Image (spheres, grey):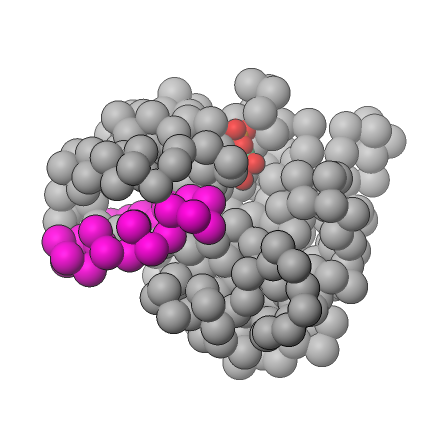
Amino acid sequence: MASPEARTPLMAGNWKMNLNHLEAIAHVQKLAFGLSDKDFDAVEVAVLPPFTDLRSVQTLVDGDKLKIRYGAQDISAHDDGAYTGEVSGPMLAKLNCTYVVVGHSERRQYHGEAEESCNAKVKAAYRHGLTPILCVGEPLDVRKAGGHIAHTLAQLDGALKDVPAEHVASIVVAYEPVWAIGTGEVATPENAQEVCAAIRGRLAELYDRPLSEGVRVQYGGSVKAGNVAAIMAQPDVDGALVGGAALNAEEFVKIVRFRDQ
Ligand SMILES: O=C(CO)COP(=O)(O)O
């Protein structure tokens, strides 16, 4: 059975709608300059830029043989066709993306994405060899009413409906409580651990324990260099999905080096 030590931490920077393709190149160059082989041995590092940056990031990563991985912030549920404005799995796969975010709370909030759409997007990602970073997490009113675990697990169940174990074995689940996103209000390490452990427990119920022990569960929501170490010290937290703090290369390097903070 995979132990927590066997799960390589994943530090992923979700840039949201920030940094154009020229800024993206400068930013990834700074990350590459700031990080060493030792960092990449200990931690997997990924950036999740806007779609328009991906080709530039790919060219830089390939050309300089960087160990930084990259991915997209969304994926169409469809593989091609008349879906104006969408970007397909085959397009992302062609750009050698490793990851794709599915079900970020901002997509749920502003684009009405719910379980069915997240489920279709998870399946679309796997059809094309992309690893979903599936985001789940409760809004403030649900947390205040004590329903955070039920809410988060229902999102997990919905997104994984009919997704086979061979796929889910590689998924990344990001617990991102909505009240902690971009608010500066970080969940306590205990809050993060409680829900990340519940997610792992549900994966064991839906699939099996060895699978659940191998899946990486990230925490996201106001992560910065100053709070990342305490969150990463929790046994069921295997990385962070970082928004605002990932836009500053020096800060993100420090987050990757959470063991030194
Ligand atoms: O939404 C997030 C990452 O996906 C978190 O954003 P912040 O780190 O800015 O709170």
The residue lying furthest to the right in this view is: 145
Locate the C terminus by quadrant: top left
The magenta segment: 42-67
Q: Residue at x 38, y 70 (%)?
A: 94
Q: Residue at x 73, y 72 (%)?
A: 161
From the viewer's perspective, is residue 217 above or below residue 159?
A: above
From the viewer's perspective, is residue 103 above or below residue 182?
A: below
Q: Quadrant of residue 195?
A: top right
Q: Position of residue 214 (x, y in %)?
A: 46, 66
Seen from the viewer's position, the closer of residues 55 and 115 is 55
Left or right: 203 in relation to 212:
right
Seen from the viewer's position, the closer of residues 223 and 109 is 109
Q: Residue at x 34, y 41 (%)?
A: 21
Seen from the viewer's position, the closer of residues 90 and 233 is 90
Q: Position of residue 114 (x, y in %)?
A: 78, 54
Seen from the viewer's position, the closer of residues 13 and 150 is 13
Left or right: 160 in relation to 28:
right
> In this figure, what is the number of numbered marks?
0
Q: Is residue 6 in view from this perspective?
A: yes
From the viewer's perspective, is residue 7 above or below residue 181?
A: below
Q: Position of residue 78 (x, y in %)?
A: 64, 71
Q: Is residue 137 in view from this perspective?
A: no
Q: Is residue 28 magenta?
A: no
Q: Residue at x 26, y 26 (%)?
A: 250
Q: Position of residue 1 (x, y in %)?
A: 44, 71
Left or right: 155 in relation to 188:
right
From the viewer's perspective, is residue 172 above or below residue 49?
A: below
